[in-house]
Amino acid sequence: MKLLPSVLLLAGVAVYDTCARGLQHVGKLQSTYVDPHQRAAERSSRLLATKQSNSAVVGDTLHLNAKTQAFVVNGTGVPDVNFDIGESYAGLLPISSNPDEERKLYFWYFPSKNPKATDEITIWLNGGPGCSSLEGLMQENGPWLWQYGTYEPVPNPWTFQNLTNMVWIEQPVGTGFSQGTPNITTEAELAEQFKGFWHNFVDTFDLQNRSVYITGESYAGQYVPNIASSMLDENNKEYFNVTGIMIYDPSINTDAVLEQVPAAAFVDYWGGLFPFNDTIKNQIKEMDSKCGYTAYLEEHLTYPPKGKFPDPHPTTDECDIFDFIYTAIYDINPCFDIYQVATTCPVLWDVLGFPGSFDYLPAGASIYFNRTDVKKAINAPVNTSWTDCSVGPVFNTKSGLDQGAQDGHLSSTTVLPGVIDRVERTIIGHGLLDMVLLLNGTLLSIQNMTWGGQQGFQKPITEDFYVPFHDDEQYATLAASGVMGKTHTERKLTFVSINLSGHMVPQYQPSAAFRHLEFLLGRIPSLTSREPFTFFNNGLQAENNPIDDKKRRALAASAAEEKARELQARQLQYRGLAQPEISEIIADYI
């Protein structure tokens, strides 16, 4: 069941449920939610009392004044973080100008010392709906990281803060530390509440007339375009000067398009990660053939598109191929992670409680952001129980999703095309190892979308996405370089695939995400650029002796030859094999 070359180039990913995080990050809700905090033992602080106090930041500051003093976070007083995270501000701000407003959103703001960032501000939003952006801060693109299974937090050389002023916001109401009773039903209402908060945030930190970039992942494929569209409609550059957006592995279409249609082709392409027996393989093929999913993919994923697409076969029980695959794989890989399908056992401990497709908290451990000492250190409401994703719905609808998503009208068919036309740059990125939302489903959505006067990309996605070579100075934040995927730009929309990445691109491929942000901000001309990174600091260094690709390939070939000679010598010494046998071994080894 191999696909056409244009499809094979970017074999995609999908999404499903059964677990709290596996459901909610992509707009799915489960019937019963087991609160991991019920099993968590309260952990006492190991910091000195003097370190717990939020004293004023010392040295040169960018935003410290009478208005912002109450939001100061002591950079040396964040529990378990044994280094200074620098100047930052966190707390709650209301969603309106009403003095009695009880609905408030929680934020954590990190100003940047990059001289190119003085006229801009970038927002990061995680998905859900109802999942906390503090996850993004702590495990994706914040100034410090505490990844799955690691000993302690470490500085993040790939933090977005190294490029731009960054704010991570927990929204809508009902998410994370945010306060109040959720009362919205639509993305339009969500955007109105967000604008009210944003107006207050801009006034508090004197950020008027800045270029605004909005970024996020997963269900932020709904959030980001709708918020951007609503801000642009204000025609107010003092507060809402949206200049670009970036969305990773986004919820921009229906489950049928993003999950069901690409599922069989995805499993076929990544067959080594889905080693089903012949019975299961045949069942997948029969379901796919009966429901016409791969046939639909091959018919419509073309460059340029042939015309507007009809709806695919609906997700009936007999055509729920995605659910069938997702259930079957757990018999083979009980630690299967829908967010990164190459993951195997063991399940790693995660300080946020969700190290994969399901929640897991070892006995005696606690959820980091639900600790009292942490809440006090970051100006969070102490009496609020923090969860990675909200226990209850954040939209007052039957499904718990926004009304548009519930009715099958998501951003690729509503506001996203208009946003692309009105901002300078839009980036849609997708990790190849993500099965939460399938890459080929994202490409189908793009090819059925009309912006800039034309439908879809007119040319296939064939250009190399390049991440500059660099020296990593700490093992804890090693990151890839070289050709890291494929990319293409037309009419201000850029698509990029990311090799070896799952659903959370900045987490799995931080150097790639850093490069994406450089392009979004206009610091580099394209994602094919071979220019070095525009910023080096905090453990991230340019190569001491940069060399061109031709010379690099020559060095790599020389190293391979040397490895082959070493292998040959070892085999001759220890096994006494004949020369022809040695040659065969070397050929396989290389």
Image (cartoon, rainbow, N blue to C red):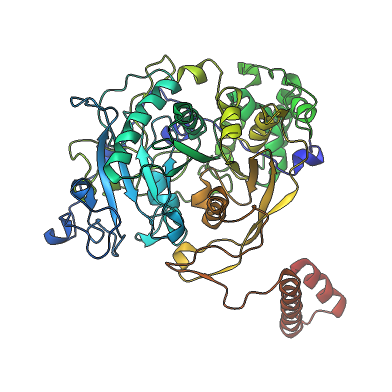
Height in image: 315 above or below 196?
A: above
Q: Which residue sits at x=75%, y=38%?
A: 7
* Residue 34 located left or right of residue 121: left
Q: Which residue sits at x=65%, y=32%?
A: 441
Q: In which image quadrant can residue 545 be found?
A: bottom right
Residue 172 at least partly seen:
no
Q: In which image quadrant can residue 254 be found?
A: top right
Q: Which residue sits at x=73%, y=29%?
A: 454
Q: Position of residue 382 (x, y in %)?
A: 18, 40
Q: Position of residue 260 (x, y in %)?
A: 64, 27
Quadrant position of the N terminus in the picture: top right
Q: Nearer the viewer, residue 52 or 365?
A: 52
* Residue 178 located left or right of residue 428: left
Residue 179 at least partly seen:
yes
* Residue 481 located left or right of residue 107: right
Residue lying farthest to the right in this orientation: 580
Residue lying farthest to the left in this orientation: 49
